[in-house]
Image (cartoon, rainbow, N blue to C red):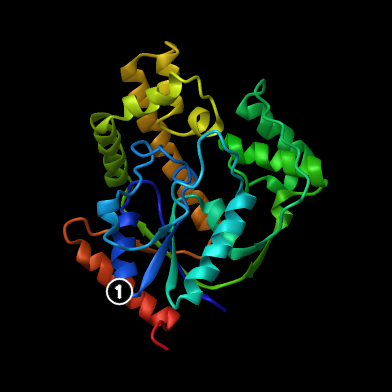
């Protein structure tokens, strides 16, 4: 099977920095697995890697869609698998990096999609109402779909209504690649501090202007109305909340998202976790590199 390295973890923990070092060491090319970084011009709010930060390493599946273009998990599965093939054919190692667990799982596992899709958005229903509706239709989702993750609940509902079977039956445990899953993490207090400081930095860097550039054009597509950092500022521009409340909400929603990421990774993927050494990041790089050498036999 083709060799693939996966670097995952919650938002803000240091995946980008690690991925560059690993790509240099193993002649790798990086494939994005962040659902928001697919879109052009969503730069500050997604903490998208800059050209300078790439350090010459090829990066794929960044900035491939406009915010008014549809992009599904099925699209990502096809695109990611194609990129894996291209990179392997060049004799390089694909390194998938990101925090969107469903993207990662759909690309690497035997994850099948229906050709027909029900696309209800359920705008008139609360998340709690949708979750209760889902488990009445499909009790196999209990414990497998986060009751607070509205988009996953909607995806599961639409899948069931289209296929008359559970979305949980659509993924087998069969992995299609020789993959190693590396997670980097830190303790909760440190992570939450990093997230809060990161949001403050985004505001300083111009996040408000970035979001306003879409708002004044009356663009209300899914990335902007559901993406963290964008939906909260849209509410501010709509005068539903003040700026301080919007910033606090971005921090709160980012922290909650990190918790959901951990839940998915720990239940859905065979991750080996490494604690980030922020005082000496080389320690983290060396520890991860030893693990890769041992488990993927890169040099064989």
Residue 217 seen from this side: yes
Q: Residue furthest left?
A: 279
Residue at 59% in and 34% down: 150
Left or right of 145, for residue 211: left
Which residue reaches farthest top? 239
- Which one is in front, 290 or 84? 84
Name the quadrant containing residue 171. bottom right
Measuring 55% from the left and 29% from the top, which residue is drawn there?
Answer: 221
Above or below 280: residue 139: above
The residue that appears at 41% across and 15% down in the rendered structure is 237
Residue 129 higher or lower than 298, as above or below: above
Q: Locate residue 200 relative to residue 1 in the image: left or right.
A: left
Q: Mark 1: which secondary structure?
A: helix
Residue 31 position, x and y percent, is 45, 59
52 up-or-down from 256: above or below? below
Instruction: Give coordinates of residue 133: x percent, y percent.
Output: 73, 32
Quarter occupied by the C terminus:
bottom left
Residue plotted at (75% across, 49% down): 166
Q: Is residue 275 visible?
A: no
* Image position of 2 with respect to 230: above or below: below
5 left or right of 71? left
User: Dot 1 corresponds to which residue?
Assistant: 25
Q: Position of residue 108 (x, y in %)?
A: 58, 64
Q: Dot 1: within a 10 Å radius of its alpha carbon, few (fewer than 14), some, or many (20 or more) residues? A: few
């Amino acid at each position: 099977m083709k060799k693939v390295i996966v670097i995952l973890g919650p938002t803000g923990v240091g995946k980008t920095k690690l991925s560059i070092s690993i790509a240099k060491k193993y002649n790798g090319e990086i494939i994005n697995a962040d659902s928001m970084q697919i879109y052009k011009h969503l730069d500050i709010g997604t903490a998208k890697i800059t050209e300078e930060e790439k350090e010459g390493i090829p990066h794929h599946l960044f900035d491939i869609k406009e915010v008014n273009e549809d992009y599904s998990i099925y699209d990502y599965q096809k695109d990611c698998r194609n990129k894996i093939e291209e990179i392997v054919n060049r004799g390089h190692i694909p390194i998938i990096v990101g925090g969107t667990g469903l993207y990662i799982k759909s690309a690497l596992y035997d994850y099948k999609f229906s050709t027909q899709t029900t696309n209800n958005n359920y705008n008139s229903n609360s998340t709690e109402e949708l979750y209760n509706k889902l488990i009445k239709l499909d009790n196999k989702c209990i414990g497998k779909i986060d009751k607070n993750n509205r988009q996953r609940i909607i995806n599961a509902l639409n899948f069931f209504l289209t296929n008359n079977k559970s979305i949980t039956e659509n993924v087998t445990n069969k992995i299609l690649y020789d993959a190693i899953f590396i997670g980097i993490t830190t303790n909760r207090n440190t992570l939450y501090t990093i997230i809060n400081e990161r949001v403050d930095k985004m505001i300083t860097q111009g996040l408000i202007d970035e979001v306003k550039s879409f708002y004044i054009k009356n663009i209300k597509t899914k990335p902007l109305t559901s993406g963290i950092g964008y939906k909260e500022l849209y509410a501010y521009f709509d005068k539903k909340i003040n700026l301080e409340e919007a910033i606090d909400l971005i921090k709160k929603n980012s922290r909650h998202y990190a918790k959901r990421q951990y839940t998915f990774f720990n239940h859905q993927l065979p991750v080996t976790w490494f604690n980030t050494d922020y005082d000496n990041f080389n320690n983290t790089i060396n520890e991860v590199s030893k693990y890769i050498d041992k488990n993927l036999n890169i040099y064989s």
